[in-house]
Image: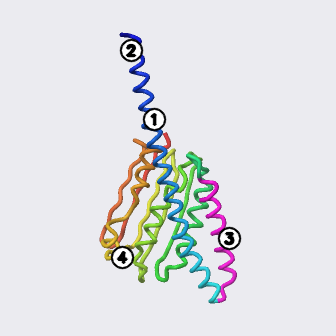
Amino acid sequence: GIPFCIKLLLQLFRNELKTTQLAKDNLQLEFNFLKAQINPHFLFNTLNNIYGLILQGDNKRSAVLVDRLSELLRYILYESDHQTMSIDREIKLLADYTELEKVRLNNTLVSFTFNSDGSINQIAPLLFIPLIDNAFKYSADKPGSVINICLDIQHGLVLFKIKNTVDIRALNNSGGIGLSNFRKRLDLYYAGKYEYTAGIVEDTYIVNLIIKSS
């Protein structure tokens, strides 16, 4: 009976490993699909914005945006396949992404701030992009509109917050803000170590994410 029990336990253990690996593989496929989905959509809009600036004769700003776009795509396509990446590289990504996206807005005041005490050096790659993408996607872009993005790292905590004025009609037609992939990646990399809330207060959508490093 003992050899049979050992064999059964080993088989159960192998099955559990296969299930876990399959879940990770499926999530990686979704992550790759997310990257593939972002690139054409984001690239199309950005190139149109840069083209518009060129037609306006703003060659200096156009050159800066082309450089930002090149750096961002290089990172997304070739450097973000690790489980974690340098927080400095992610900050550069967020800054570039924000600058490229805000070109198409006419009335919205956009801000991105980052502060760190150096207690965290690594983070899951591209984690915040779906949240920032939604902030721009559902922006009301009317006088008085804002998109405030703030990332603080303090005492081993990642504190990420977005406040943006939303177009309620577009939001209702979309069926909601957010991607299921974002939640799945949080559960994979930071299970039991994060707090996430999102909701509307009047015409402002507020996202709060807290991640514990340990």
Q: CA distance from mark 4 to mark 1?
A: 44 Å
Q: Residue at x 31, y 76 (%)?
A: 169
Mark found first going from the N terminus, 3 or 4: 3
Q: Which disc is residue 4 wearing?
A: 2
**Label 2 crowd bin: few (<14), some (14–19), many (20+), radius 10 Å:** few
- Percent position of residue 109, x then y: 48, 76
Identify the residue position indicated by label 4 in the image.
167
Q: Secondary structure at mark 4?
A: loop
Q: Residue at x 64, y 74 (%)?
A: 65
The kind of residue on which mark 3 rests is Asp
Identify the residue position indicated by label 1 in the image.
18
**Label 3 crowd bin: few (<14), some (14–19), many (20+), radius 10 Å:** few
Of helix, strand and loop, which mostly describes the magenta segment? helix
Q: Secondary structure at mark 1?
A: helix
Q: Nearer the viewer, mark 2 or mark 1?
A: 2
Mark found first going from the N terminus, 1 or 3: 1
78 part of magenta stretch: yes
Q: Which disc is residue 3 wearing?
A: none
Q: Nearer the viewer, mark 4 or mark 1?
A: 1
Residues drawn in magenta: 57-80
Q: CA distance from mark 1 to mark 3?
A: 43 Å
- Percent position of residue 6, x then y: 41, 16
Mark found first going from the N terminus, 4 or 2: 2
The kind of residue on which mark 4 rests is Asp
- Percent position of residue 208, x then y: 40, 57
Q: Secondary structure at mark 2?
A: helix
The kind of residue on which mark 2 rests is Phe
Q: Nearer the viewer, residue 7 or 113?
A: 7
